[in-house]
Image (cartoon, rainbow, N blue to C red):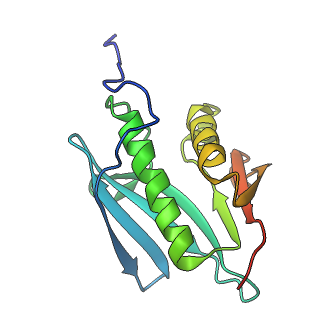
Amino acid sequence: MKAKFVFEIGEANIKPYPFTKKIKRSDNDILYMFNSPNENYFVNFMDYENEMHPEYQVDFGITKGGYQYSTLNRGELFSVMSTVMEIIRSFVNEYNPYILHAIPKEDYKQDHRRYKLFKNYLTKNFNDSFTIHETMHPGTNAPAMVLIKKNYNK
C-alpha cells in the first residue's frame, strides 16, 4: 500500500490558491474554480431560492470530466482548505446568506473525516458571524452542518 503524506506544514499561514467565480444561470448555482498543482477544484453554492431570506448549500470537489465529489489525498490539504474558506468568505461578503448548508460529500460511506475537517475549518473561520448547528442530511443520513447568520441584516 502506498503511503499518503501531507506535503505542507501547519495551516495558520497557508496562502489560498487564486480562484475565479462564474455564475451558472441555468440552475442559479454560483460556482468558483481554482487550481492546485495536482487538481482542478470547484466550490459550488446552490441557491435554495428561499423567498424569505437567502439560503444556500455549499460543497466542493474536483473537476475531472464534470464536477465530482471525490475525496482526495494529494498532499495539499491546507492549501485547498485555505482556498475553500477564502471562497466561502468571499461568497458570504458578496451574497450575505442568512443560512448556509454545508454537506460534505463522501460521508454517506460512514467515513466522516471530511465532515470533521470541514466542520473544524468552518468553526474556526465563521464562528464569529454564524451559529453552527450539526444535523443529519435527510437524503443520505450523513452528518451535515447548518450555519445561521448571527445579527442578520437584509
Horizontal relation, residue 11 to residue 131: left or right: left
Q: Is residue 72 visible?
A: no
Q: Residue 124, image x and y in percent? A: 62, 43
Q: Residue furthest left?
A: 37
The number of discs equals: 0
Camera-side residue of 23 and 86? 86
Horizontal relation, residue 10 to residue 133: left or right: left
**For the point 44% across and 33% down, which residue is it?**
11
Horizontal relation, residue 107 to residue 138: left or right: left
Where does the C terminus fall, quadrant-wise? bottom right
Q: Residue 119, image x and y in percent? A: 64, 43
Q: Residue 57, image x and y in percent? A: 60, 65
Q: Is residue 65 visible?
A: yes
**For the point 39% across and 79% down, which residue is it?**
23
Camera-side residue of 118 and 138? 118
Where does the N terminus fall, quadrant-wise? top left
**For the point 59% across and 49% down, which residue is it?**
125
Q: Residue furthest bottom?
A: 51
**For the point 41% across and 38% down, which residue is it?**
13
Camera-side residue of 38 and 150? 150
Q: Residue 97, image x and y in percent? A: 64, 74
Camera-side residue of 82 and 67? 82
* Residue 101 figure quarter: bottom right
